[in-house]
Amino acid sequence: MSKQRFGLSAALTTPFEDDRTIDLPTLVAHARWCLDNGCSSVTLFGTTGEGASIGTSERGQVLAAFLAAGIAPARIVAGVMANSVQDAAEQSREALDAGCLGVLLAPPSYYKNVGDEGLFAWFSDVFTELGSSARGVFLYNIPSVTAVELSVDLIGRLKAKFPAVVAGVKDSSGNWPFTASLLAAHGDLAILIGDERSLAAGVRLGGQGAISGMANIYPTRMLGMIDEGRDDPALSNLVDELVKYPVTPAVKAMVAHRVGDAGWRTVRAPLAAISDGDAARLARLFDGLSQAAAA
């Protein structure tokens, strides 16, 4: 898989009805918009998609809705966030057996201060449990959420033991020295940059693209960063402002403004929507960047 460049995947945010059930038609339509505007794939159930708040049966319903709508499974990545080996393997198998491009697999996060040996054993057990279904796994390094950091050495050990399984890494550490070391050590993998502010620099060092929350909003604009490694200071400045808020509710507020549907601001507990004032401020920033691009 690393031989074919990954490109841009939208870390799809998930729309909810007033009762917080998933609005499947709106989610499918949003995915189509992302794919039609520069994304090579979409990622379901990731951090921006509130994946940890979406149940097992709901995951199946979402995937079935996408396939029924004619979205090719090869353009879908499924996020997996589970603590038990069995749950991680079952969620991964559902997506992989349906033909999805791959899975974005986060480490277990309930136990803190675990070391590389424990993490190596956990990932190994998941891959073994998957058996013949095991392929297309993107290891997800997002220590700000999981409190678990995937080391460069650990990634190397997993790559060496499971070369047909580990396809790449999504690095959302926001730690540029770590990202650079990851790119230097594992250039044969698809290294995906989670922090849009480091995306262009990462691509210049061999990064293959991104699974990005900002692709819910500005996918076409991001293609210069993805395809050419071209810096976009204005977009980076917007990300600086966005991360001053809880990121997922902030991204949803910007999508709500882009499409003119306040329903997009709904999140599931324990998250809470940002205030009307904060949403209005982000809307002004969105408009300012859009107007600058059009000028």
Image (tube, rainbow, N blue to C red):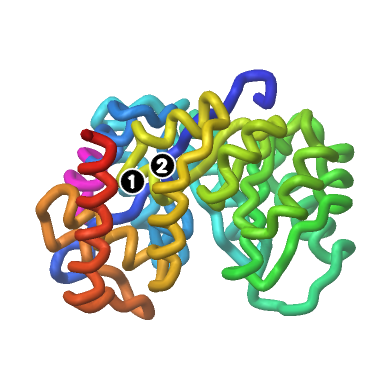
**Residues marked 2 and 1 touching at CB (< 8 Å):** yes
Horizontal and vertical percent position of residue 81: 56, 60
Count all numbered tags in the image, as a single digit.
2
The residue type indicated by label 2 comes to: Ala
SS at badge 2:
strand
> Can residue 132 be seen from the camera position used here?
no
Residue occupying the point 36% across, 76% down: 271
Q: Quadrant of residue 284?
A: bottom left
- Magenta region: 23-29
Query: In the rendered image, which quarter contains the C terminus?
Result: top left
- The residue tagged 1 is 216
The residue type indicated by label 1 comes to: Asn
Q: Quadrant of residue 86?
A: bottom right
Q: Nearer the viewer, residue 93 or 197?
A: 197
Image height of 270 relative to 173, above or below: below
SS at badge 1:
helix
Horizontal and vertical percent position of residue 211: 50, 43
Horizontal and vertical percent position of residue 247: 41, 66
Q: Nearer the viewer, residue 288 or 96?
A: 288
